[in-house]
Image: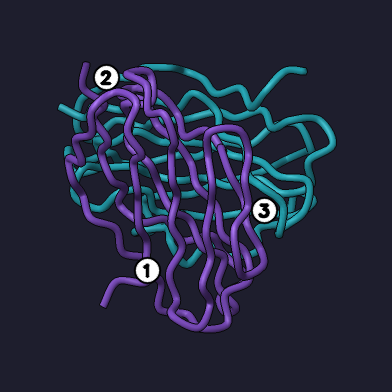
Chain colours: A cyan, B purple
Amino acid sequence: DAGVIQSPRHEVTEMGQEVTLRCKPISGHDYLFWYRQTMMRGLELLIYFNNNVPIDDSGMPEDRFSAKMPNASFSTLKIQPSEPRDSAVYFCASSLQINQPQHFGDGTRLSIL
Amino acid sequence: QKEVEQNSGPLSVPEGAIASLNCTYSDRGSQSFFWYRQYSGKSPELIMSIYSNGDKEDGRFTAQLNKASQYVSLLIRDSQPSDSATYLCAVRGTGGGNKLTFGTGTQLKVEL
């Protein structure tokens, strides 16, 4: 079975640029989650979707962050404009139901210069 | 107080020993508990889930849950160098849409 697929694996860009991260969840999973991981704060939930609908975006740090899920097999996390403090590893995860284990993608390592 | 707390480590154990990893949580109504293993530069990988008080065994791994004391632990028997990783405790709370909250992880080093 294909797992959660994220792209790109690495992104290096300059401050002020728009960054778009992409995720394809496991087929059949109704829930999709976006996390950010840093050394200081660990793994933090940014937003999650149920059947393509955003349910909780309270973890999104600022208006510069936005996420969409136009269909069951694709989601994007966008940062505009990007700042150096956004540098982190961004993970996408999916699960069958909210109380089922979450399966993570390989992550996108983002560096904002 | 953090919602999910773990000692950051590193926890060093000799090969073949039992490694004991601990986690405490603040939401008394939490019902679901998970242990993830994360190798350096890799994504978290689920290794255990536990929902009821007591022990749950899977191979060399045993998860222990005590809801009254609000702690969950992971025991790794016959530790191997390949077990060296960071172990993340995750707890599903009762509020905020049943979100999964992760601890910052305990780094385990298994030495030859």
Q: Nearer the viewer, residue B24 or B17?
A: B17
Mark 1 neighbour class, 10 Å CA radius: few under 14, some 14 to 19, many 20 or more: many
Q: Residues within 10 Å of mark 2 (few under 14, many from 20)?
A: few
Q: Chain of mark 2?
A: A
Which residue position is annotated with label 1?
B24
Residue A91 lies, in percent from the top left, at: 47, 36
Per the model, the C-alpha gap separating discs 3 and 1 is: 28 Å
Secondary element at tag 2: strand
Q: Quadrant location of residue B43?
A: top left
Mark 3: give few (<14), some (14-19) or many (20+) Cα within 10 Å.
Answer: many
Mark carried by residue A49 = 3
* Viewer-side label of 3, 1: 1
Name the chain letter of the residue that bears numbered label 1. Answer: B
Looking at the image, which residue is at 67% across and 53% down? A49
Q: Residue at x 36, y 51 (%)?
A: A64
The C terminus of chain A - image quarter: top left
Q: Please state if B94 lies on the left or on the right of B11 as rendered.
A: right
The residue under label 2 is which amino acid type?
Val
The image quadrant where one finds the N terminus of chain A is top right
In the image, residue A105 sits, relative to residue B65, either above or below, namely above
Which chain does tag 3 point to?
A
Tell me the amino acid under the disc marked 1: Thr
Q: Are marks 3 and 1 on the same chain?
A: no
Q: Please name the residue that numbered disc 2 is placed on.
A: A12
Identify residue type, mark 3.
Phe
Residue B103, given in percent of the width and then of the height, sits at 36, 56
- Dot 3: what SS? strand
Residue drawn 23% across and 55% down? Answer: B7
Percent across and percent down for residue B109 are 23, 29
